[in-house]
Structure formats: structure tokens, C-alpha cells
Image (cartoon, helix red, strand yellow):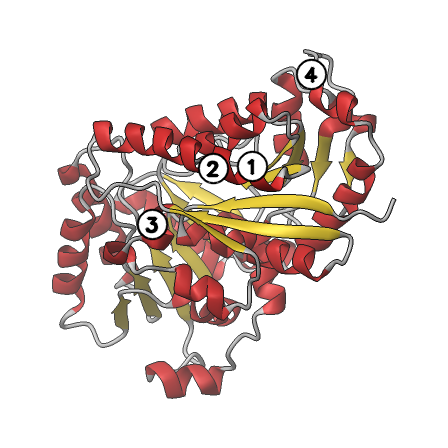
Amino acid sequence: NMTKKKIFIFTATRAEYGLLRWIVKTLQEDPRFETYLIVGGTHLSLADGYTLEEIKEDGVKNIIQLPFLNASRTSEALSSSIGTGIIQLSKVFDLLKPDFSLVLGDRYELFIFAITSMMFKTPIIHIAGGERTEGVIDEQVRHAITKMAHIHMVTTEFYAENVSKMGEEDWRIHIVGSPGLENIKKLKLYSKEEIYNLLGINLDYPTVLCTYHPVTLENEENTISQVKNLLESLSQYDIQVILTKPNAEVGSDKITDFIKNFIKDKKNMYLFDSLGSKMYLSIMQYAKAVVGNSSSGIIEAPSFNIPTLNIGDRQKGRFRPESVVDVGYSLEDIKKGLEKVLFDKEFLDRIKNIKNPYGDGNTSQYVLEALNKILDLPKEKLLKKTLDFEVKKDEWHRYF
């Protein structure tokens, strides 16, 4: 059958597009598919950097804009933006009649795509289901999308099992790895010399990469005392510390002010607003350890065979590679953790050759292979879902 299959891929934020980038590229290069990127949300918002331009710079074709987002961020504005999005998208579906919809993650905007796809009887492919995070609304969205989706492309076996336990049939599950790891493989990372020329930082010195985000469910005083303990512990060692600014969340500006104050008389501590993923990963490849509570310590760091000191609860529920050391918030805890990730020879030797459980950086290739398997299935089989709570791991499709 030579008619091209039409695939709609949806993106509403810069972070999500960063994870979808190579998948979009790979599918658009394959002549068997006609791939459209439906772009909405903050990509089209001037206040948020109008990141549609970055997508165009990547050479993406077949972009369809969905300007559903209101300027205001009230509950009323956000929930009506979902309605607006469905109205806009249903016209696009009616015009182009896609064969598949592909979405990633856990953002509320995914409901626009999921509801419209369902009404148009279009099979939904969901990437990165089955994960757990402590963030309240994301958790609900992610699992709701899993129940609406027909094919689950999950990052690890651990999450495949979660999806299966939710009653999803095991033949629908494809383990493709974390799409973020593809950036490590495909972005040409900077050398030490290039980093020195761009940032003025010499990575021949032992360096730690540090990111600390506010934990949404904790109060601000708590967060500041956590950051204080972290910085005081780090400053007791003869190491260079590269800090990146926390995500824009409640309390993040106070953290940033505190860090700026703390480091102004320290010559070996640096704070950057944003390094961009290429520079961030380039520094990571030369770092002694990743410290803080960012998911990059759990998902990306193991690919460089370096240890991670993960502090507190922000990553609770995520699957841990053995290179991750978890500690609490106290000075004593953090110090003990730093001793381990910086100087414990036995531990450091053990993780020298670990295999990253989140994949090998070929996710877009595996998404393509998974699509090949799905194309042969009758549409009725895909659309007709039954609850099946028995986990049959031998029916999963594994790609790495």
C-alpha cells in the first residue's frame, strides 16, 4: 500500500519540543509518512520567547499553528484555552484526516489532542507514560492520557510495568528509551577548549554541575535552608561549582537571589541563567558529579558514567540508576553524599561502566521501528481497548 500515512505530532512548550526534535526529524525524513507538527501553547507566545522560530530554524516542514493560548494564566483562561484548542484542532483533523496522533509527556494541553483524536477515531501514540513525579496536576494528566492512548512508547521497563498494571494490554507497549538522551549523541558537544573560550571556565579543575529547583509542595523557608546547606557543603571542598538557575516556579526567584549572594565572594562558584542543552551536556561530560534535584542527574548523567547526588523529594517515584545517591536535606547528609560521589573509589569504580537504563540515544530510530510494527495492525484492533491487569512482559516490544 503506497499511500503515505499521515502522522500528527503535537508540541506546546519548548522543553517538550526539545524531547520531540529528533523524532520529528526522523519521521519527516521517512518517505512513507506525511508528518505534520501541530504547534501551539507558549511556542506562539511573545511573552514566552515565541519559540516557533527555533522550530523553523531546525528545518521542520508542515507546521500547523494552533493559537489556543490566552495571555492570562488564570484557571478560567487555561481551561477555556483547552476548549479553544479542541475547536481549532477539529477543523485541522477534518481537513487532513490523520492516521495517527503522537503526543509526549504530561502537560494539560495534551487533552486538546487526546479528545480530538478520540472523536475522530485516530489511534493515539503516547511517549513517556507510566512515570511518576510528585507534581500534582502532571501526574493526573499523564495517567489520564495513558488510558486514552492506544500505543505506549515508554522510556524503561520500570515504566512499562506501571502502564501494564494500569490495565493496558502488553502488546501495546514499546520500550524505546528516553528521547532526551538523543541530544547527547546528536548535538556535537563542545570540547574543554571551546567551553573555556565561551565561558572562561577551565574544566581541567574538578567540577560539579549543580541545579536546584524548588519542590512545588514545600514552603519557601524550607527551600532556602535546603539551598544554604547545599552551598555550604559544596564550598568546603576544593572544587569548581557550576550552578544553573532553577525553573520558573513559585519561590525560584528567592533561590536565585540567595545563590547570587552566597557566591559573590567565592571565586570557584559560577551561576548561569541558562546554559542551553548543548552547553549543559558539554559541561556534564567533563564533570565529576551532578548535584541537586534535577531529573538530568537521573536520566542524562548515567550516559556519561558519572555519579549523581540527588537531594530530597523532587524526583520521588522516578526509577534510579545505581549511579544515583539519594540524601536528605541536612548539612550532615549532603556532606556524606558528597564524600561518596567525589571520593569513594569503590563506588566510582563500580559505576564506571554502567548501562543507562533510560536508553542508548537511539529513541527516534526505535519510534520508527515501532511505527512499522503498528502499521500492519488493523485499525479496529488498535482502537478497541480492553482492560487486562495481568502483566505479560514477553509481549512488550524492547528496542535496547
Q: Amino acid at mark 3?
A: Thr
Q: Amino acid at mark 4?
A: Lys
Which label sits on residue 42?
A: 3
Residue 88 x/y as whole percent: 42, 37
Q: Is residue 269 left or right of residue 281?
A: left
- Sooner in the amino-acid sequence: mark 3 or mark 2: 3
Residue 117 x/y as whole percent: 57, 30
User: Is disc 1 in contact with disc 2, using a CB cutoff of under 8 Å?
Assistant: yes
- Cα distance between the residues tagged 1 and 4: 22 Å
Nearer-the-camera pick, 65 or 197: 65
- Give me the residue at 58% from left, 64% from top: 184
Query: Which residue is denoted by mark 4 in the rendering?
Result: 385
Picture quarter with the N terminus? top right
User: Is disc 3 in contact with disc 1, using a CB cutoff of under 8 Å?
Assistant: no
Q: Secondary structure at mark 1?
A: helix
Q: On the image, which quarter does residue 181 sit in?
A: bottom right
Q: Is residue 144 left or right of residue 25?
A: left
- Cα distance between the residues tagged 1 and 2: 6 Å
- Give me the residue at 49% from left, 36% from top: 91
Query: Which residue is denoted by mark 2 in the rendering?
Result: 89
The mark closer to the camera, 3 or 2, is 2
The mark closer to the camera, 3 or 1, is 1
- Cα distance between the residues tagged 3 and 2: 16 Å
